[in-house]
Amino acid sequence: MEGVKILMIIADKDFRDEEYLVPREVFEDEGIEVRVANASSKESEGSAGTKVMPDYNIGQAVVDDFDAIVFVGGVGAKIYKENEAVLQMVRDAYNLNKIIGAICIAPLILSRAGIIKGKNITVAESGIEKIKEEGAVYTGSEVEADGNIVTASGPSASEKFAKKIIELLENK
């Protein structure tokens, strides 16, 4: 998948380590170029201690430069539900027909951006009622794809989530 680029968005603090590490490895094993963004441009730290230096501040990342945008979950990801730059990035990616991935609690970011109404979505248990309120169809699946949106329920789905994103990229 040479030439394919994915932007992974992580929280500055308390992202789920395996929801970042596993998909990134799967993507890179396929030859995909992975870049990372966060809100601060400073080193992020996962809830299990993984440290990641981002390539971009979210405001510096240009959606059109990437084939997919992937939001990593974990409690830290909740900060992006209120970040207008992130919500606009999601809307732009959706309007440009980019693949958008979100795992664990991160589908709530897509919900807040207003792109999940009528879509089949999965999310961590704590987000089920919220996505239903936003008009999504909660499926309870480990991984769900509806159009260009891929969602996953949590860390145990990390590899399957990454493979589904790759499958959609291959079909573009």
Image (cartoon, rainbow, N blue to C red):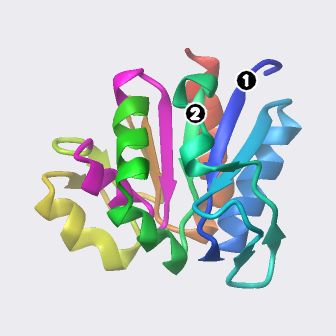
Q: Which residue is mark 1?
A: 4
Left or right: residue 68 versus residue 122 is right
Q: Secondary structure at mark 2?
A: strand
Q: Which residue is mark 2?
A: 68
> Quick check: marks 1 and 2 in contact, CB under 8 Å?
yes
Task: Indicate the position of residue 86 as horizontal and vertical percent values.
Answer: 43, 50
- The structure residue drawn at horizontal position 73% and vertical position 77%, both measured from the top left corner, is 45
Any magenta on residue 96? yes
- The structure residue drawn at horizontal position 26% and vertical position 56%, both measured from the top left corner, is 112
Query: Where, quadrant-wise, is the C terminus in this rendering?
Result: top right
Q: Nearer the viewer, residue 118 or 4?
A: 4
Q: Nearer the viewer, residue 85 or 81?
A: 85
Instruction: Decide which of tag 1 and tag 2 comes sooner along the chain.
Output: 1
Query: Where, quadrant-wise, is the N terminus in this rendering?
Result: top right
Q: Which residues are magenta?
A: 94-115
Alpha carbon separation for disc pair 1 and 2: 9 Å
Q: Nearer the viewer, residue 93 or 23?
A: 93
Q: Quadrant of residue 129?
A: bottom left
Callout 2: 10 Å neighbours few (<14), some, many (20+)? many
